[in-house]
Amino acid sequence: MEEIKRLIREEEAQTTAEYALVILGASAVAGALIAWAAGGEAIKGFFTKIFDKLTSGL
């Protein structure tokens, strides 16, 4: 029984870590979009190229 409890605790910790990584990734993307909107040239060129490729396929 103790083994099952330990496995459940480990799985919960792993899920929490996965959520933290997803939130960190989303924050990084949001920060890059804000920098693009603010006019950072390197990031602006990067996102402009991505949006151009996405819209050219439609």
Image (tube, rainbow, N blue to C red):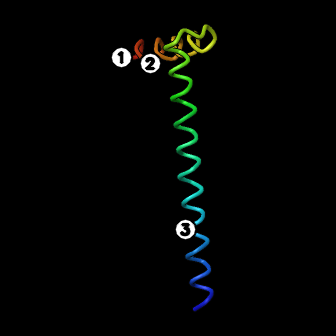
What is the x, y in percent for residue 50?
51, 17
Residue at x 47% of width, y 11% of height:
52
Identify which amino acid the numbered label 1 is placed on: Leu
In the rendered view, tell whether residue 4 sits above or below residue 40: below
User: Circle 3 sits in a helix, a strand or a loop, which is it?
Assistant: helix
Q: Nearer the viewer, residue 58 or 39?
A: 39
**Which image quadrant: the C terminus?**
top left
Q: Nearer the viewer, residue 17 or 56?
A: 17
Q: Tell me the quarter of the picture where residue 24 sits.
A: top right
User: Circle 1 sits in a helix, a strand or a loop, which is it?
Assistant: loop
Q: Between label 3 and label 2, give the one nearer the viewer.
A: 3
* Pointers 3 and 2 in contact (C-beta within 8 Å): no
To which residue does mark 1 refer?
58
Q: Between label 2 and label 1, give the one nearer the viewer.
A: 2
Instruction: Report the Cα–Cα distance between label 3 and label 2.
Output: 37 Å
Q: Which mark is residue 12?
A: 3
Number of other residues with Cα within 10 Å of mark 1, as a class: few under 14, some 14 to 19, many 20 or more:
few
* Pointers 3 and 1 in contact (C-beta within 8 Å): no
Residue at x 54% of width, y 35% of height:
27
Of mark 3 and mark 2, the one earlier in the sequence is: 3
User: Circle 2 sits in a helix, a strand or a loop, which is it?
Assistant: helix
Number of other residues with Cα within 10 Å of mark 2, as a class: few under 14, some 14 to 19, many 20 or more:
few
Q: Nearer the viewer, residue 50 or 6?
A: 6
Instruction: Report the Cα–Cα distance between label 2 and label 1.
Output: 7 Å
* Pointers 2 and 1 in contact (C-beta within 8 Å): yes
Number of other residues with Cα within 10 Å of mark 3, as a class: few under 14, some 14 to 19, many 20 or more:
few
Residue at x 59% of width, y 47% of height:
21
Q: How many marks?
A: 3
To which residue does mark 2 refer?
54
